[in-house]
Image: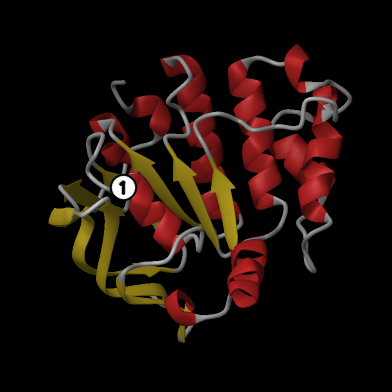
């Protein structure tokens, strides 16, 4: 597989008064095109900080983040903005939809940022939201809102989709629907997807699992037989 991202000796520290708090400690790993990766860790393990580093939201204290042969850890703020706009799609636990825009309009806002967006009609169909395109977020269930949020992230046609606890606010039924959708996009559009979660059951659907604890990887495992979301015991 072709490498899409290489992280080398990544460290992140925060200064709180006179105290230096280490959050990430010398992480080195690669992510490959088309992979479905789960980064698994409890609250405080550093997984959201790691996602922010990969996504260009924050900068590391030390180390490299190489995206397609370019170290995004050392580029200008403007170049970092372009990286987030063109290369990265974000999905969060809470849907962050614009409340006074319809389903279709929420997705269209993101599509206008892309030079090569995915067809909006295709995304509405694949997310099961084509009959709800004129609805506002307040008229949708939590699962439906998250499907719209995923469509909004995917419509830009990013290389890398980063999802932070994407089913944390959903029941198991809607969680299965969301992960089935993510797996569908992973296969159909060959999108590299990284899931950040504390839920060990989600590891069953991954190609690889990164176990993060206290800012360091305990281990990285290959999963040679990823399960389908509907087959996992949640």
In the rendered image of this protein, does residue 233 appear above or below residue 1? above
Quadrant location, the C terminus: top left
In the rendered image of this protein, does residue 56 appear above or below residue 183? below
Q: Position of residue 35 (x, y in %)?
A: 40, 59
Q: Residue furthest front?
A: 18
In the rendered image of this protein, does residue 184 appear above or below residue 20? above
Q: Residue at x 47, y 21 (%)?
A: 169
Quadrant location, the N terminus: bottom left
In the rendered image of this protein, does residue 142 appear above or below residue 15? above
Q: Is residue 212 left or right of residue 65?
A: left
Q: Residue furthest right?
A: 134
The residue nearer to you, when weighing 63 against 108, is 63
Q: Residue at x 63, y 32 (%)?
A: 147
The residue nearer to you, when weighing 77 against 128, is 77
Q: Position of residue 185 (x, y in %)?
A: 57, 48
Q: Residue at x 49, y 31 (%)?
A: 93
Mark 1 packing: few (<14 Cα in 10 Å), some, or many (20+)? many
Residue denoted by label 1: 47
Q: Residue furthest left?
A: 218
Q: Residue at x 16, y 56 (%)?
A: 216
Q: How many marks?
A: 1
Q: Position of residue 11 (x, y in %)?
A: 25, 66
Rendered image coloring scheme: secondary structure
Q: Position of residue 90 (x, y in %)?
A: 56, 48
Q: Is residue 21 left or right of residue 110?
A: left
Helix, strand or loop for disc 1: helix
Q: Is residue 54 left or right of residue 189?
A: left
The residue nearer to you, when weighing 223 against 212, is 212
């Amino acid at each position: 597989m072709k490498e899409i991202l290489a992280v080398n000796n990544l460290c992140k520290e925060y200064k709180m008064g006179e105290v230096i708090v280490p959050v990430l400690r010398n992480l080195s790993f690669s992510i490959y095109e088309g992979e479905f990766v789960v980064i698994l860790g409890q609250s405080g393990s550093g997984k959201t900080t790691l996602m922010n580093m990969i996504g260009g939201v924050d900068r590391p204290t030390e180390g490299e983040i190489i995206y397609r042969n370019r170290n995004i850890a050392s580029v200008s703020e403007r170049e970092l903005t372009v990286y987030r706009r063109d290369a990265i799609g974000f999905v969060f636990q809470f849907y962050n939809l614009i409340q006074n825009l319809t389903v279709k309009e929420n997705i269209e806002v993101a599509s206008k940022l892309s030079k090569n967006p995915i067809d909006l009609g295709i995304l509405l169909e694949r997310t099961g939201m084509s009959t709800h395109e004129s609805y506002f977020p307040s008229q949708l269930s939590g699962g439906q809102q998250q499907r719209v949020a995923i469509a909004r992230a995917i419509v830009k046609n990013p290389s890398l989709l980063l999802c932070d606890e994407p089913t944390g606010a959903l029941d198991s039924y809607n969680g299965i629907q969301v992960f089935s959708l993510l797996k569908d996009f992973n296969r159909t559009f060959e999108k590299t997807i990284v899931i950040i979660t504390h839920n060990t059951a989600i590891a069953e659907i991954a190609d690889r699992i990164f176990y993060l604890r206290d800012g360091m990887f305990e281990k990285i495992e290959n999963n040679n037989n990823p399960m389908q979301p509907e087959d996992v015991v949640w």
